[in-house]
Amino acid sequence: MENIFFANDIMSKISLTKIPGVGTARSTALARLGLFYVADIFNFFPSRYEDRRNFSKVNELYDGYTVCVEGCLGTISSKRLDPSGRRMLIQTTLEDETGQIQLIFFNRFLDKQLAEGAKVVIYGSVSVRQDKLQIVSPEIIVLDNDEQKAKEQIANFSRLLPVYPLTEGLKQSYMRKLVAEVFKLYGHLIKENLPSEILSCRSLMDRAQAFKETHLPNDEKNLNEGRKRLKYEELFIKFSSGENVRRESQKTPFYKITSDSKDLLKNLNFCLTDDQTNAIEEILRDMTTCHMSRLLQGDVGSGKTLVALAVANATIKNGYQVAFLAPTEVLAEQIYEEAKKVAPVAAHIAFLTGKTSKTERKLIEEELSNGKINFVIGTHALFSLTEKFKNLALLIIDEQQRFGVNQRKTLLAIKPTPHLLMMTATPIPRTLTQVLYSDMTLSILKQRPLVTKNGIKRKEITTKIVPTKDVQKLLAFVGSEIKNGGRVYWICPRVEDDEASNLPAVEKRVEWLARMLPMFSVGLIHGQMNSDEKLLAMDKFKKGECQLLAGTTVLEVGIDVSEASVIVIESPNRYGMSQLHQLRGRVGRGSRRGVCILLVRQDELNERLKFFASTNDGFLIAEKDLENRGSGDTFGVAQHGFANFLIADPLNDAEIFAEAKEDAKINY
Ligand code: ADP
Ligand code: MG
């Protein structure tokens, strides 16, 4: 995890092994959580808090409640659960003036510590067994006979306590102790880092206290203030660095591109959508006045490629070079084909992938340095060309979330920095876009082309939920679809069959489909095939040599086969809604209307799938997806290649987002 709170701080160099109680075993476990240095502990935020401040009486207890209770222990019985006595069952009761409740422990060490009549405080959750309330394995402390000491014990025990996400070999109590120790030893080194104007104007808690309240809270009010301050800080730092990049890029020398945005695409037999035209204009306007850095966001099928190609063509006409980067060979090839169609006379296009032969590659490099080639399209192989360009003025990155930030940087290190156009079909909720791409400007394609390439009116994709018991009917539908000229994708979760799970495997599925629909040819595509095999499978499907293609989600990205009209998705719950939406976007791209079928068992049907089936709005789906995943934890955002937040929450902290964003614009 990027250490945004303590980048370059000396505490990010002090190893946790310096702390008493952190030995080899512990430090290995801590490392699994990404905790190596003192600073890491400070920004290892609790995932929630346990409130032990309110005590309950026994007669108030109820099934499912997690409670703190004070009382006396009743008779204690213990029983060995195995011959060695390593596992032991201890049963007793806790009694106060209102009643008694059964306690059960499995901790053999407690056998010696607990005694009948002892005063104790426990914390645990109440359950019901055979109509009786019980608490299994509560935390327990035996109170001292000295009243003063007992008071202290209670005060220590019944607090607002942080709950940390843990891993094997670490206990919650250990983690809490460690955090407290780190604060004792190093807490005083935490320095303020926000401008004082901001602190007073936004009434934010000071930094050292904010960390302390977040980890060792005293009360809710301070805890909330502390967390708010840290959320603000995290966002402010992200926004500011974005602003800095933007400010820098406004100063950087850039290739000036002039163009009137008309007639940039040759041989188009359809009209661009208004959104496409606007995006092209916006991008070109930037390129005449400053260093362009834009994210082109548009739902699947909205026609991003043509926008990029129009801008590429303008750049070429100005006498400069363009590089177009795609995440897979299949996609790169698709772009190459489209580019050749619409390219201006001046364009000399090269295609480069990992498979390009050495000699050919050498030739491409040579012709890039002398400027003969002015447009290169390809995959990751382009990263090694950094030194070879004569005048690279524009870098286009398709499906940008598939590339690492550092990969991007290698090509942007070229001087003068090429204009940057990144594209994504994964709609990102607004709040997230603001932070993640704060150094970029957004262009959005909202509408999809209403007519297809061939001038036929495009229809919305319909999504249907089909129960597995109707699979025969589904097969009949698939058969008639293909007979009528359509083509069908069939998505399965896994490549190989494995006994342990009852999910369908794509290889089995191919055999089955071929058996059930013997009059058609069934193809197979999955991630474990090499890229040649994948290309071949795609090609056959494109040409119609096979009409039914079974595959895993390798199909998800950008594949464009206009005859594809139906996609069947098995076990759709395996995927996030945004991913389902990507998959659905594979069909209905041509003249045939698109149908997406979610094939579900009775127990798999849920509100999420119903919602998904009810809308085609990718942005709405993205927002919902984020909500569903819940925020705070891993949130699945990482899977899209977005930065994760340590403490800020893009769904619930909209106000802090807005404040931090506004403040970051001011150059402190
Ligand atoms: P995506 O935004 O998903 O990358 P593509 O650029 O692959 O979408 O475009 C999807 C399909 O729509 C392509 O076949 C493309 O040629 C076609 N297309 C793009 N713009 C238009 C338009 N204005 N009218 C009709 N078809 C279009
Ligand atoms: Mg695309």
Image (cartoon, grey):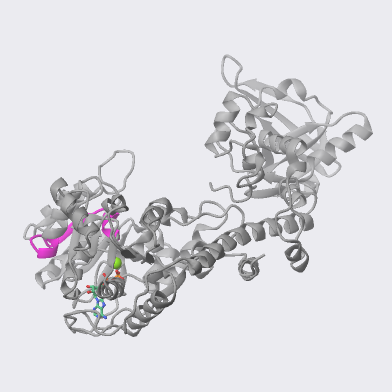
**Viewed as shown, does residue 487 lie left or right of 36?**
left
Give the quadrant of the C terminus: bottom right
**Viewed as shown, does residue 70 lie left or right of 436?**
right
**Viewed as shown, does residue 446 lie left or right of 49?**
left
Q: Quadrant of residue 161?
A: top right
In the image, residue 312 sits, relative to residue 130, either above or below, namely below
Q: Closer to the camera, 585 or 107?
A: 585
Q: Quadrant of residue 600?
A: bottom left
Q: Is residue 320 magenta?
A: no
Residue 342: x and y in percent read 19, 75
In the image, residue 98 sits, relative to residue 170, either above or below, namely below
In the image, residue 140 sits, relative to residue 270, either above or below, namely above
Residue 650: x and y in percent read 56, 63
Q: Closer to the camera, 143 or 492?
A: 492
- Residue positioned 15% across, 60% down in the render: 548
Magenta range: 541-556
**Viewed as shown, does residue 164 lie left or right of 74?**
left
- Residue positioned 34% across, 75% down in the render: 257
Residue 118: x and y in percent read 83, 29
Q: Closer to the camera, 516 or 264?
A: 264
- Residue positioned 67% across, 28% down in the render: 18
Kindly tell me whether residue 41 is visible in this rendering: no
